């Protein structure tokens, strides 16, 4: 990946994440609600990834866990990619802010929704940049429950074989999925070792530590051409104490008064 811009101050990225979470809560207070828990857990990953892509020519961010679209739209807005505030229009007819990422939204190149499909989209983009000799690559953001999809692992195998050192997988490991805890439904133990067995470089980090996330994304491609998988431990509903770590935060619709209270708690 070729850097084309200056490094963004860490405090600005943290401030973007705070504003992003508040916008997500606004969307939960809309007429249709939103996937709140996963959008809040993935916020810091989205902000860090969009910042990295914004400074790298030809790099795309693909939100493979498409149900966290509210988080993506909010992060695109706070990162300056999307001029319009999406919160008042989320889920409404006549607007592009659908429940899964829409390619009609500026900054969204790949529509996603069916879990697992965003990873091969990202790998395909990274491969195209490599084959054409152009700079850039892809950052795919996936959920830990999503890793139960076999397509993810098939893509990892191909990405390693093709030497896609310009591909990064950021795993939003919040421990939950639609039907309950990942550990109860289909455990993913020794996750870093699994990625390593498929030929990827691996790293583990606190998914809410902006400094750690930006440091990992700033490493650049591996000389040996191995993709990077970052297992980022996160908290479902991060930033809103009333729902942090709770399965009930998966999809939420709240009223304006509650949204105002929750937003005051996000710092």
Image: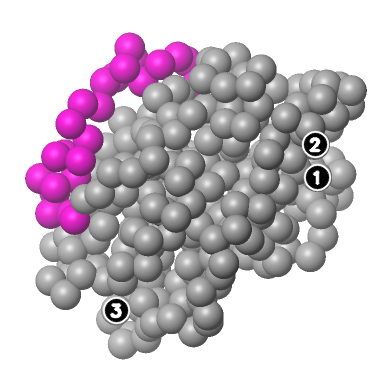
Residue 238, numbered circle: none
Query: Dividing the image into 4 quarters, which one contains the N terminus?
Result: bottom left
Mark 2 or mark 3, which is nearer the start of the sequence?
A: 2
On the question of residue 42 being in view, the answer is yes
The question of residue 190 being in magenta is answered with yes
Task: Tell me how far mark 3 sits from mark 2, CA to CA.
Answer: 40 Å
Per the image, the residue denoted by label 3 is 130
Examine the image and state in which quarter residue 187 appears: top left
Q: Residue at left 66%, top 17%?
A: 242
Tell me where residue 237 sits by quadrant: top right
User: Could you tell me if residue 63 is visible in this image?
Assistant: no
**Residue farthest to the right?**
257
Magenta segment boundaries in residue numbering: 178-201
Would you say 252 lies left or right of 86 here? left
Q: Is residue 31 above or below residue 98?
A: above
How crowded is the residue under tag 2: few (<14 C-alpha within 10 Å), some, or many (20+)? Answer: many
- Do the numbered discs 1 and 2 sit on residues whose CB atoms are within 8 Å? yes
Q: Residue at x 27, y 71 (%)?
A: 221
Query: Which is more toward the observer, 121 or 142?
Result: 142
Q: Is residue 222 left or right of residue 130?
A: left
Please give the name of the residue rendered at 29% of the width and 79% of the height, measured from the top-left corner: 130
What crowding class fits label 3: few (fewer than 14 Cα within 10 Å), some (14-19), or many (20 or more)? some
The answer to whether mark 3 and mark 2 are in CB contact below 8 A is no
Q: Secondary structure at mark 3?
A: helix
Horizontal and vertical percent for residue 194?
16, 39
x then y, percent, for residue 77? 72, 58
Q: Which residue is mark 1?
A: 87
Local crowd size for mark 1, using a 10 Å CA cut-off: few (<14), some (14–19), many (≥20): many
Q: Report which quarter residue 175 is drawn in.
A: top left
- For label 2, the SS is helix
Query: Disc 1 to disc 2, how far (Cα)?
Result: 6 Å
User: Mark number for residue 26?
Assistant: 2
């Amino acid at each position: 990946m070729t850097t084309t811009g200056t490094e963004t101050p860490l405090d600005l990225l943290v401030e973007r994440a705070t504003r992003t979470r508040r916008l997500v809560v606004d969307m939960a207070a809309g007429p249709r609600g939103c996937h709140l828990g996963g959008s809040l857990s993935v916020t810091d990953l989205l902000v860090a990834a969009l910042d990295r892509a914004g400074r790298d020519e030809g790099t795309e961010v693909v939100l493979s866990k498409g149900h966290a679209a509210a988080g993506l739209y909010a992060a695109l807005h706070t990162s300056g990619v999307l001029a319009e505030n999406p919160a008042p229009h989320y889920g409404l007819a006549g607007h592009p802010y659908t429940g899964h990422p829409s390619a009609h939204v500026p900054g969204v190149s790949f529509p996603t929704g069916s879990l697992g499909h965003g990873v091969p989209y990202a790998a395909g983009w990274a491969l195209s940049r490599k084959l054409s000799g152009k700079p850039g690559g892809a950052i795919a953001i996936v959920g830990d429950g999503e890793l139960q999809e076999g397509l993810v692992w098939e893509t990892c195998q191909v990405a390693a074989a093709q030497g896609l050192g310009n591909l990064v997988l950021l795993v939003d490991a919040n421990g939950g999925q639609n039907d309950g805890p990942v550990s109860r439904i289909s455990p993913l133990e020794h996750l870093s070792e699994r990625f390593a067995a498929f030929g990827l470089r691996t790293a583990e980090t606190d998914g809410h530590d902006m400094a750690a996330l930006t440091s990992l994304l700033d490493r650049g491609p591996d000389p040996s051409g191995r993709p990077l998988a970052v297992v980022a431990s996160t908290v479902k509903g991060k930033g809103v104490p009333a729902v942090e770590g709770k399965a009930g935060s998966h999809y939420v619709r709240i009223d304006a008064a509650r949204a105002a209270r929750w937003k005051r708690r996000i710092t």
